[in-house]
């Protein structure tokens, strides 16, 4: 099939995730046909620096044969066996061991799933099981944050705080949402430090309003990813820690994006010095080459659910799929052997910070923020008042298209442009990324004038 035939069949038979089908029908899809290192190429031969690591998952880029070969070899040896009914497979044990090593010291158990959404559903099941076994069945409510993203299953989407999603389904009734720590968009006249404290105090207020004896857990991404790379003010996590320490409430950190090195530490929890009870992971654990997710469980929670009797009636056919686990093992070994995360911390992370900050001088950039290997640009019409161009987020869409035209994949969340390049990006490629982003901004400014 040629390009237009592919697009036509795509339109006729394939419903894409998070897509306006009407729009897609008019514009046609971009057909991506190959990839290498940090670059992807579409069917027209247009090569782009992938500033989004696929969908926050191909952190080691597209050319790691160690991972694809590990999958292939496993598929030839034992393509599938389940972990139900007291069975197990060698790759699942080895990956569980490795995860216990690289995650925080107090986390030594894993429950495998097929995705991040399933892992957050698993968290809901573990949270309830934990409090039931502790004879505190009244602890039922989970607090999350507005504009959070925790996946697309009913559980994941209920935990998430995106209003556009909530309009289209009926959320679970035991989940409450509080203020997000989005200083640029919602901080008003407060300094970032003041606003960080304020947003954390909202958690305390909500707990008091609901009654601490009814609150089971608080879930949060270390940094909101899909919500627009919302890096909380430095005061936020220490204050959240203070609040949580006062009450007997579980902390779930959703590390689906920030796990496995994006901050320059193994996990966001390490970066912020937090000790979560549950830690969701997915995406980069297999470098995106095979579907796999899971949740890491603290000793405190694992001791309760493992030592008290009775079956935990939860699990997926593909929990601990052997080929997925081999992909995870190969990925973690590369991260460790090649000191990829140390390089982000000491070299490419600081270099991106320096170059990315230069974009703040652009006339349509209200803020350029970054941490490790993520970054965001707030597009504004007026820098002083932070006023946007319009309320339809046209600037974001235009900038995304201009960026692609200039050979860089950036994503738009509203009028916030975001990047999360592969962790293997070199300094030269950081230069290329920033130069292409600047050209996209110039083109956007012209188009919006
Ligand atoms: C992508 C994502 C999820 C959902 O993972 P899927 O594998 O798409 O189900 C959950 N939480 C966060 C923070 C994510 O970025």
Image (cartoon, rainbow, N blue to C red):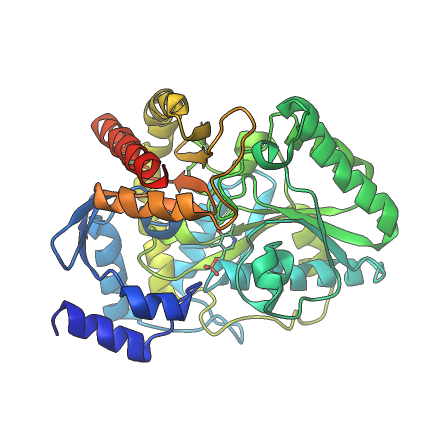
Task: Name the image quarter holding residue 419.
Answer: top left
- Pinpoint residue 437: horizontal percent, then vertical percent: 30, 34
Residue 231 seen from this side: yes
Considering depth in this image, is 88 or 233 the residue closer to the camera? Answer: 233
**Residue at the (80%, 52%) spot, across then down:** 215
Residue 334, located in which quarter of the rendered image? Answer: top left
Q: Position of residue 76 (x, y in %)?
A: 23, 70
Q: Pick the residue in front: 180 or 393.
A: 393
Residue 52 appearing in the image? no
Where residue 36 sits in the image (x, y, percent)? 17, 48
- 214 above or below 180? below
Q: Is residue 243 above or below residue 117?
A: above
Marks counted in the figure total: 0
Q: Quadrant of residue 360?
A: top left
Q: Residue at x 36, y 21 (%)?
A: 358
Q: Nearer the viewer, residue 190 or 217?
A: 190
Measured as percent of width and height from the top left, residue 19 is found at 41, 64
Q: Residue at x 37, y 52 (%)?
A: 55
Which quarter of the image is occupied by the C terminus? top left
In this picture, is 92 found above or below 341? Answer: below
Q: Tell whether 61 sits left or right of 87.
A: left
Query: Would residue 204 be found to the left or right of residue 43 on screen?
Result: right
Which residue reaches farthest bottom? 13
- Quadrant containing the N terminus is bottom left
Report the front residue among 276 and 254: 254
């Amino acid at each position: 099939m040629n390009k237009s035939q592919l697009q036509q069949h795509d339109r006729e038979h394939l419903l894409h995730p998070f897509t306006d089908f009407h729009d897609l029908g008019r514009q046609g899809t971009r057909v991506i046909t190959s990839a290498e290192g940090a670059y992807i190429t579409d069917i027209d031969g247009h090569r782009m620096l992938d500033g989004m690591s696929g969908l926050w998952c191909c952190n080691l880029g597209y050319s790691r044969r160690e991972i694809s070969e590990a999958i292939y070899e496993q598929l030839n040896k034992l393509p599938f066996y389940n972990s139900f009914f007291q069975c197990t497979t060698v790759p699942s044990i080895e990956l569980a061991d490795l995860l216990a090593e690289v995650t925080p010291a107090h986390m030594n158990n894993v429950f495998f799933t097929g995705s991040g959404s399933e892992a957050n559903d698993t968290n809901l099941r573990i949270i309830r099981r934990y409090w039931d076994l502790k004879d505190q069945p009244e602890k039922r409510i989970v607090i999350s944050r507005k504009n959070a993203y925790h996946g697309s299953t009913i559980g994941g989407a209920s935990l998430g705080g995106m209003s556009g999603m909530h309009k289209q389904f009926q959320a679970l009734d035991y989940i409450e949402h509080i203020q997000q720590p989005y200083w640029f968009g919602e901080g008003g006249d407060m300094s970032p430090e003041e606003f960080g404290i304020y947003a954390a105090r909202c958690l305390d207020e909500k707990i008091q309003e609901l009654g601490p004896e009814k609150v089971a857990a608080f879930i949060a991404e270390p940094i909101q990813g899909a919500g627009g790379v919302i890096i909380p003010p430095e005061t936020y996590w220490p204050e959240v820690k203070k609040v949580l320490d006062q009450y007997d409430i579980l902390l779930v950190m959703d590390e689906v994006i920030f796990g496995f090195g994006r901050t320059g530490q193994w996990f966001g929890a390490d970066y912020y010095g937090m000790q979560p009870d549950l830690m969701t992971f997915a995406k980069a654990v297999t470098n995106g080459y095979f579907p796999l997710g899971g949740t890491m469980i603290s000793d405190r929670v694992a001791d309760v659910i493992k030592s008290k009797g009775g079956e935990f009636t939860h699990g997926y056919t593909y929990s601990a799929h052997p080929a997925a686990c081999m992909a995870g093992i190969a990925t973690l070994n590369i991260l460790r052997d090649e000191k990829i995360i140390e390089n982000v911390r000491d070299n490419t992370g600081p270099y991106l910070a320096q170059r990315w900050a230069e974009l703040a001088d652009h006339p349509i950039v209200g803020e350029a923020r970054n941490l490790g290997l993520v970054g965001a640009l707030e597009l504004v019409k007026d820098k002083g008042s932070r006023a946007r161009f319009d309320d339809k987020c046209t600037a974001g869409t235009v900038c995304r298209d201009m960026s692609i035209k200039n050979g860089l994949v950036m994503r738009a969340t509203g009028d916030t442009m975001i990047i999360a390049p592969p962790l293997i990006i070199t300094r030269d490629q950081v230069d290329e990324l920033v130069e292409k982003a600047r050209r996209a901004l110039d083109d956007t400014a012209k188009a919006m004038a």
